[in-house]
Image (cartoon, rainbow, N blue to C red):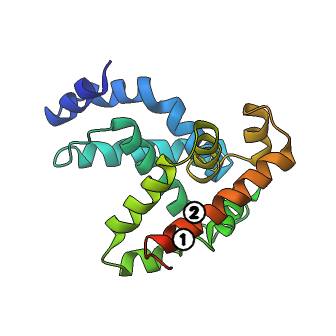
């Protein structure tokens, strides 16, 4: 079913909206949640919580890009679950590694919440991503959006682990310079 039709089901408060969402997006949500949480039980709870949150947020929200909306809700809930558990080492430590890798480019949640110009930050990140080629963008998003292990990314893009690590290192440096160029020093 097309995304706009699924959103319409939510707007009409039809219960089959959840089933259509599950059919289309459960594997996607599982990938995001599992890469962050590293265990199926927490992953399933996170997905159920995400679908409930989506049900409660549409309406009033009417997302234009349902996959991004679903991914964001799932990712945020998975990260919240990690924080609630005292940032235990889960998922092979990928979540902590991902956050540690980006710490020099983008500050933590507290700083973003305090800044009134978070839209400016989002626009700067989006413009950075638009300037990348498809492989760089894919590698960056798989690491920092999906929290995918570097070994998996290297395999997916048919590159060595050292090449993938090096590419991510260079991309973080470019992101930091881009943010500074945009006047965003965090």
* Residue at the disc numbered 2: 175
**Element type at marker 1?**
loop
Q: Residues within 10 Å of mark 1 (few under 14, many from 20)?
A: many
Q: Position of residue 104 (x, y in %)?
A: 63, 74
- Residue 31 falls in which quadrant of the image? top right
Total marks placed = 2
- Which residue, as the protein is rendered here, is positioned at the far left? 12
Q: Are marks 1 and 2 in contact (CB under 8 Å)?
A: yes
* Residue at the disc numbered 1: 106
Q: Position of residue 29 (x, y in %)?
A: 50, 38
Q: Describe residue 38's horizontal placement relative to residue 176 as left or right.
A: right
Q: Closest to the observer: 166 or 41?
A: 166
Q: Describe residue 110's horizontal placement relative to residue 96 as left or right.
A: left
Q: Position of residue 46 (x, y in %)?
A: 50, 48
Q: Closest to the observer: 39 or 124?
A: 124
Q: Residue at x 63, y 50 (%)?
A: 147
């Amino acid at each position: 079913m097309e995304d706009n039709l699924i959103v319409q089901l939510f707007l009409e408060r039809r219960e089959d909206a959840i089933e259509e969402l599950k059919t289309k997006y459960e594997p996607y949500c599982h990938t995001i949640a599992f890469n962050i949480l590293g265990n199926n039980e927490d992953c399933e709870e996170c997905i159920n919580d995400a679908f409930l949150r989506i049900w409660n947020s549409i309406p009033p929200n009417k997302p234009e890009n349902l996959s991004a909306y679903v991914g964001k809700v799932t990712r945020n809930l998975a990260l919240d679950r990690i924080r609630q558990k005292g940032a235990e080492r889960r998922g092979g430590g990928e979540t902590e590694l991902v956050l540690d890798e980006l710490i020099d480019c983008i500050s933590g949640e507290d700083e973003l919440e305090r800044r009134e110009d978070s839209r400016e930050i989002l626009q700067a990140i989006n413009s950075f991503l638009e300037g990348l080629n498809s492989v760089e963008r894919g590698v960056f998003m798989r690491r920092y959006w999906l929290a995918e292990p570097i070994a998996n990314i290297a395999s997916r893009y048919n590159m060595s682990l050292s090449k993938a690590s090096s590419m991510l290192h260079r991309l973080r440096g470019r992101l930091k310079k881009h943010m500074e160029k945009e006047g965003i020093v965090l």
